[in-house]
Image (cartoon, rainbow, N blue to C red):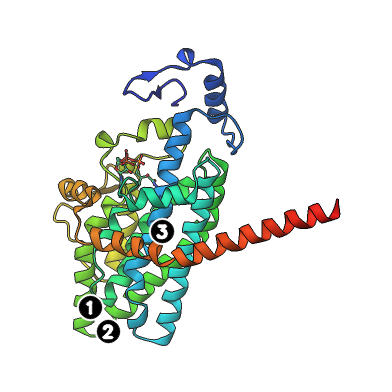
Amino acid sequence: MYAQMVKTDGARIRSLDEMDPEERAFQERIDAGQKIEPKEWMPEGYRKTLIRQISQHAHSEIVGQLPEGNWITRAPTLERKAILLAKVQDEAGHGLYLYCAAETLGISRDEMYEQLHCGKAKYSSIFNYPTLTWADIGAIGWLVDGAAIMNQVPLQRCSYGPYSRAMIRICKEESFHQRQGFDILMKMVKGTPAQKAMVQDALNRWWWPSLMMFGPSDDASVHSAQSMAWKIKQNSNDELRQKFVDQTVPQAEYLGLTVPDPALKWNEEKGGYDFGEPDWEEFFNVIAGNGPCNAERLNARKQAWDDGAWFRDGLTAHAEKAAERRAAAKVAAE
Ligand code: BYC
């Protein structure tokens, strides 16, 4: 479908016939559903797009540990604490798979961290909101991991092999994450009126930011056309947002909650919900670094980097000494 419409670095769309033979052969492989592997030729734009998206995805997993990590010490029971701890550790693992996938494209992990710390690389807007109550932990699992799954399931079919394989592993764990969030909320809505009110308040605060996770509306999405032509993305931002709303509204009803959108209405004809427009000004403000917790999140990551300096130095010194010993042993053996 997109084979004839590949967007160039400028905004122009050009046909397969306009490509040089190498690029055309590449696009034909993509169109035939073949995976691209690290050492193979790829257009520079494809490599850069993947580095941008995969590294931002990895940063999101790592920064995403912060709002939930905030509640590990305050989980209401030992069991809830153990589950949350496991989930937050999973997020660290997801970050590591993704950094590894990005490294196969020729960028080092240090460079990726540097891009995060200086504000060049983004991470998901959702993690710039605070977790105020225990119900927020349930809402993150249910809504944020729910949105993440909706976005990540198609990424399992991404044309770049290492990203696709990382996503297969990650998706398996995400479904546990979503269920643990829903389980927290199920328990709370059956609790006291105050607990149920706490859940409704969490939904009120997390609903719109969750819809924003899918990115700007299709007409404002600068990368979608090219990323879909390269089969990095399989669906547009609005398509996935619609699927998420259609899946989540019945779950909210099951919990006895009200989705905070007066425009929400089942549309029989389209077989999905009509819903209101997210506040895009808020979204662009958050991704520009001005959300409620942007400074706090970035400072926590920079602090962690600084605090780890002694350990990185130790590892480097050890590696250098080991290399010297190996070189000396080789000379002695000759
Ligand atoms: N937040 O042209 P567009 C998780 C940026 S973590 C921030 O549509 P694209 C979890 C976008 O980068 C899951 N920025 O872009 C972890 C671009 O700016 P740049 C995270 C956003 O790439 C812990 C500009 O807006 N998932 O599950 O085609 C605990 C224009 O957008 C956002 C991923 O990272 C946003 N929400 O589409 C719990 C999935 N949206 O880069 C849970 C992988 C857009 O030109 N990423 N921007 O400066 C993707 O699928 C795509 O990158 C997006 C955006 C759909 C997010």
Residue 157 in the image: x percent, y percent? 52, 43
State the SS at label 1.
helix
Whether residue 151 is visible to the viewer of this picture, yes or no, is no
Q: Nearer the viewer, mark 3 or mark 1?
A: 3
Residue at label 1? 196
N-term-proximal mark, 2 vs 3: 3
Relative to 32, say whether 113 is above or below: below
The verdict on label 3 being within 8 Å of ligand 1 is yes
Disc 3 residue crowd, few under 14, some 14–19, many 20+, Cα 10 Å: many
- Foreground of the two, 162 or 220: 162
Marks 2 and 1, how far apart in space? 7 Å
Label ID, residue 61: 3
Marks 2 and 3, how far apart in space? 31 Å
Q: At 72% across and 60% down in the image, what residue appears?
A: 325
**Marks 2 & 1, CB-CB < 8 Å contact:** yes
Residue 143 in the image: x percent, y percent? 32, 62
Q: At 33% across and 20% down in the image, what residue appears?
A: 12
Relative to 82, say whether 164 is above or below: above
Disc 2 residue crowd, few under 14, some 14–19, many 20+, Cα 10 Å: few
Residue at label 2? 191
As shown in the figure, which amino acid type bears the numbered disc 2?
Gly
N-term-proximal mark, 3 vs 1: 3
Whether residue 124 is visible to the viewer of this picture, yes or no, is yes
Quarter where residue 135 is shown: bottom left
How many numbered circles does the render carry? Answer: 3
As shown in the figure, which amino acid type bears the numbered disc 1?
Lys
As shown in the figure, which amino acid type bears the numbered disc 3?
Glu
